[in-house]
Image (spheres, grey):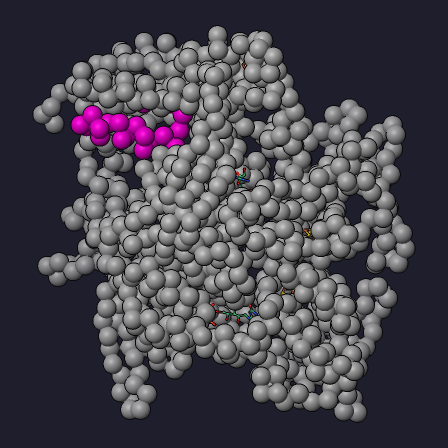
Amino acid sequence: MAEKLRIGVFVCDCGTNIAGFVNVPEVCEYAKTLPDVVYVKENMYTCSNAGIQEIMDAIKKHKLNRVVVASCTPRTHEPLFRKACEQAGLNKFLFEFVNIRDQCSWVHQKEKEKATEKAKDLVRMGVAKARLLEPLKEIKIDVEKKSLVIGGGIAGMTAALSLAEQGFEVYLVEKENRLGGLLNYINQIYPSDANAQQFLEEIVKKVEKEKKIHVLLNSEVESVDGYIGNFNVRIRQKKESEESKEIKEIKVGTIIVAIGAKPYEPMYMYNYDEYENVLTQYDLEKILKEKKIEKWGTIVFIQCIGGRGERVNYCSRICCMNSIKNARILKKLLPDSQIYIIHKGLQTYGTVYEDYCRKAREEGIRFIRVRDSIPIISSLEKRNGKLFVGFYHPGLRRKIELGADSVVLSTPLIQREDAKKISQMLKIPLGQDGFFFEAHVKLRPVDFATDGIYMAGSCRAPADINECIVQALASASRASIPMAKGYVKAEPYTPVIDEERCMGCGVCVEVCPYGAMKLVEKNRRKFAENIPAACKGCGACASSCVHKAINMRHFKDEQIMAQIEEAI
Amino acid sequence: MKDVLIIGGGVAGIQSALDLADRGIHVYLVEKEPSIGGRMALLDKTMSTNDCSICILAPKMNECASHPNIEIMEYSEVIEVKGKAGNFKVKVRRKAKYVDSSKCTGCGDCMEKCPTEIPNEYNSYLDKRKAIFLPFPQAVPRKATIDKEHCLKLTRNRCGLCERICKAGAIDYNQKDKIIELNVASIIVAIGSSLYEPKDLVEYGYGRYANVHTWMEYERLINAAGPTHGHLKCAPDGRRPKKIAFIQCVGSRDVKRCQWCSSVCCMVSIKSAMLANEHYPDLESYIFYSDLRVFSKRFYEYSKRGERDYKVTYIHARPGEIKEDKRTKNLTLYYEDEEKGKINKIEVEMVVLATPIMPSKDARKIAEVLGIETDKYGFIKTVDYTNPVETTKKGIFVAGCCERPKDITESVYQASAASAKAAEIAGD
Ligand SMILES: Cc1cc2nc3c(=O)[nH]c(=O)nc-3n(C[C@H](O)[C@H](O)[C@H](O)COP(=O)(O)OP(=O)(O)OC[C@H]3O[C@@H](n4cnc5c(N)ncnc54)[C@H](O)[C@@H]3O)c2cc1C
Ligand SMILES: Cc1cc2nc3c(=O)[nH]c(=O)nc-3n(C[C@H](O)[C@H](O)[C@H](O)COP(=O)(O)OP(=O)(O)OC[C@H]3O[C@@H](n4cnc5c(N)ncnc54)[C@H](O)[C@@H]3O)c2cc1C
Ligand code: SF4
Ligand code: SF4
Ligand code: SF4
Ligand code: SF4
Ligand code: SF4
């Protein structure tokens, strides 16, 4: 490096947060003795407007070419100080953060001397790294203003409509020969009790009328490569009449996954396959839709069949409300019937659902709550043409039997077969429950960790129509961000691959959680190559490479080593 | 591209603001309190991840503060809205803080010295704060506010200490409220919820028995930044509890009080029991419930984990009565033991009541100002269940707990959803 190093160090009091436990003037005096440090300043609040101004002035006045700030935490303040450097004409990656609050003064509140010594150590390490910093450039990637939505259920259609309304072109890919997914099989929808088919028809019409949405029925995504802003997608479409197939290639900026879920079929459970009049909710919807109700005297709904620890280890959220809905419909059609719902704790959360359940009680539906820790029923038998449901009644503290003309089993929604395929194709994870796994459960519920890919609806977790719509709009909002801006910026902390050392083993491709590494062939040899736009700079690849062929920019081995040497 | 107004700076308002701002739309984020953050800023950990609540929220709060497309208007209220979708004319009152925010560095010197102490609403009134204050240490913006109801200078023209102490010269006792006019294309309402007044909860001895708390109080007691620095202490001698009972649905799902289910309290009590056990590994918890609401992603698994790893016992019963031992202040709960078919009792050192999440106290007022409707429960009304973010007026959307009780996850995705709809109007 030709240019002579001129390092400026700013040490912050953070009011009393740091100065109360660390002798800041002493740390400053110490910093002045470090090599290449030409300027040191104590600030009461480095982050205040005055503090920021001082950094900018000092860069100009003292021709600083490296800046070190020792203060609170980079999590909230690094961007601020970097911006100050940039505004004063210094490449913002020539800035180093030293954390002497969260990692020092706050943890050593009772030992002022040790805290001061540790602060000095940390500043010395920071200065050592600053001396080796290199100017870097942020990477700017253009984003295609088109989106791909996989799955044409209520979630996929709603997401497509919102994106179109916001001005983006959308490809809506549906595997079946019609839109609507599960909604096609439903009679009425809770809690409004509106006709499901009318509701669906209206939405399908809107989708078909919208010029910005290209609906591709009988279609599946065959392959996807690329990264945020630039996904290359191959779609295979079956042609209805002939046996022929058509391949369509498109380029999109974002992808929304909305492939839904399917009801669990209780095969070989409770004689479902054997007895007539033992139905699933799915079967019952069909019967109600086709108005083929028989004169049943007693109807027993049984909840959580296969759910809550039986076949799957979750609560399916929609089936309690669904039973209450259908129980109410049946009660209206057959006013003299006895209707029971056997459950493990009803899931009628919120305002409207709780009222819906109360109405059902008032209308004479009977609820029987059983224990959660054992299978919901112990037997389901047919004797003399009548069904008998046996279960342990906790209030009576013994097993009882209910006779029934019809038994309706509530089974959970489970992952569709295609989930695994989509997961592999897009390199997006599935959770243990079989549903897609979000970037953060609380704060990024419809994002994937991989940029540019989002999800909505029952492929995320069982969700009713209301929730599918909310999530679909949410995914449309998230996907609109890079497309509306037209570009994304990637931090330049990307790996540098040493082609001499790289053996093309592909371990880095496997470990990268963001799909940012790929193998390419050059001169008949395989090398790892980084996709900067997708890379998060996490360093997983570098630490997994046994051949030491990967070095991280800004965290290069020699930079880290310099820090470690100062520490010991 | 036109501007959007967001009313309420809780996690929902923050998420709406960030989504819109990131896609290039300028937003005004109007918050009634001196800091954004809402309820989530006051929670200890969040179910079902047990993340530190403020630690995951603070970066988002700071992002709002430094975002070029977001203008935070803290300590402000929307007082008038005219016009229609695409062109609303809004008046906002920015209340006087008696501190010049452009000068205040948030150093805290004034708060240390101010002689006036008042019950601290941000700690559920369990300790005191000063008349000049920050609601909590991570406040955004981190600027002091003087409470004019209690400040000696502003009420009786005495004291004036903070003005003398402030090195930044930020105190301004003559500051006046300001009315600001905005023009926005769409509006998102995210004013959150209120909690049931615990004064009315006579049956379980709240207010009479020292060791009976509401769940919100418990959040502050178990929080390291709270009044007891995260140590659970029981009257009369400050000893820590060995057994805690949580009672669910106290006031919720009750036709005489709040007929709805507050949606999160079952899971929150499981979380609270887990946190207590993490602090004190021998601590046992008993959760008295009627239906355990475990419907969301990974909730059921979480409830099982509580039982397996954190000494949580679920009891399907509603305690009829609690008696306090006059000397030890321990509490004995009497309940019908379903398994045994008789009245049973259990003695614990602390009881936590899951009280209802109510419509925000401001819901009706805001609805009136905006010309939108509230539903029969008092929450902000949506057109119907298949239009889940649209209020009864075009161009005005809703997100978070002000629509109905929900957890953070659902508040966040509803907030993004509201942004999508707001952007459909504001975004061309
Ligand atoms: C019996 C029953 C009754 C119900 N009753 C109600 C009710 O009354 N009220 C209510 O609110 N909710 C109800 N629900 C829930 C509601 O119907 C669903 O949650 C909702 O329809 C799910 O929508 P979705 O878009 O997420 O998924 P889906 O409807 O499952 O749609 C997903 C779509 O993706 C397609 N797809 C799958 N894989 C691929 C692929 N690889 N490529 C392309 N496309 C693919 C599928 O063909 C499907 O069309 C009920 C559910 C059931 C099972
Ligand atoms: C005790 C308790 C524990 C909880 N624990 C968890 C948990 O562990 N995990 C979880 O997921 N959820 C939990 N929740 C639920 C969680 O708090 C809410 O989901 C979340 O805070 C809702 O966010 P919000 O933005 O809708 O409302 P809030 O966080 O309440 O924010 C609303 C904001 O609007 C402001 N405001 C109000 N009126 C006005 C007005 N007129 N003008 C301007 N601004 C206004 C308020 O000051 C506030 O800042 C808990 C709730 C409680 C009560
Ligand atoms: S929603 Fe009801 S029936 Fe379905 S799994 Fe959950 S508790 Fe069981
Ligand atoms: S640094 Fe992380 S994100 Fe980037 S290529 Fe390596 S493993 Fe992938
Ligand atoms: S008003 Fe003055 S003393 Fe108080 S926090 Fe602000 S700068 Fe510090
Ligand atoms: S003037 Fe008011 S706010 Fe300031 S120190 Fe005195 S009482 Fe406190
Ligand atoms: S979430 Fe649980 S405690 Fe809260 S009201 Fe609903 S059922 Fe009762």
Residue sitting at 47 percent across and 23 percent down? B176
Compared with A290, A84 (above or below) is above
Residue at the farthest front position: B82
Q: Vertically, is A233 above or below B354?
A: below
In percent of width and height, residue A28 lies at 33, 12
B67 sits left or right of A144 in the view: right
Quarter location, residue B329:
top right
At x 75%, y 30%, the residue is B234
Seen from the viewer's position, the closer of residues A122 and A385 is A385
- Residue A446 covered by magenta stretch: no
In the image, A557: left or right of A408?
left
Q: Nearer the viewer, residue B307 or B379?
A: B379
Residue A37 at x, y percent in the picture: 23, 16
Question: Would residue A213 be visible to someone looking at this image?
Answer: yes
What x and y, as percent, mark residue B261?
Answer: 67, 54
> Residue B135 appears in which quarter of the rendering?
top right
Q: Position of residue A429 (x, y in %)?
A: 41, 59
Residue in the picture at 12% in, 27% down = A1
Taking the spot 77% from the left edge, 52% from the top edge, the residue there is B256
User: Which residues are drawn in magenta?
Assistant: A69-90
